[in-house]
Image (tube, rainbow, N blue to C red):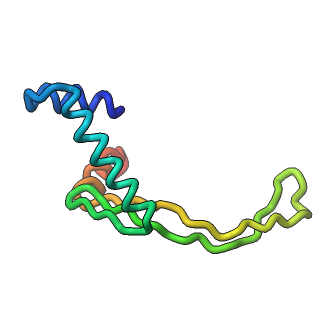
Amino acid sequence: MTKRDLVVRISGETGLTQEQVLDVIQKTLDYISEAVAKGQTVELRNFGVFEVKVRKARIGRNPNRPETDVPIPSRTVVKFKPGKEMRESVIRLNPEA
């Protein structure tokens, strides 16, 4: 699903113009990105949580030259933890469960 798909679907259900829906979706995404870029946690109930985590520095291996150690510096990354409802919906997709 793309942002365009969301806009068309929401516009059809709400009666708002696609331009209005696009503005709201884009502003929402901009505010989420802005908050995460500041290191804040963004919690959207029944959807999930975006948070900033720091990955520790570590030693990597070059598969072409395994005898050579490659230092990988620490860095910050964005993690997403899905909410309970989303997690349960995705688990139901597994044919083995």
| Residue 92, percent from left and from top | 28, 49
Residue drawn at 63 percent across, 74 percent down: 56
Q: How many marks?
A: 0
In the rendered view, does 10 fall on the left or right side of 30? left
Place residue 33 in its image quadrant. bottom left
Taking 78 as reference, is 89 above or below it?
above
- Residue 2 place in picture, x, y as percent: 36, 32
- Image quadrant for the N terminus? top left
Q: Position of residue 5 (x, y in %)?
A: 29, 28
Q: Which residue is found at the position 38% from the left and 68% from the top?
A: 40
- Identify the residue shown where x is 49% and y is 69%: 53
| Residue at the outermost left position | 15
Which quarter of the picture shows residue 3? top left
Give 22 or 11, whichever is nearer the viewer: 22
**Compared with residue 68, is residue 19 higher up or lower down, i.e. above or below?**
above
Instruction: Name the residue at 26% across, 33% down.
Output: 22
Q: Could you tell me residue 80's position as x and y percent?
A: 40, 59
Task: Give 90 or 36, whichever is nearer the viewer.
Answer: 36
Query: 83 or 39: which is nearer to us?
Result: 39
The part of the image, by quadrant, that contains residue 83 is bottom left
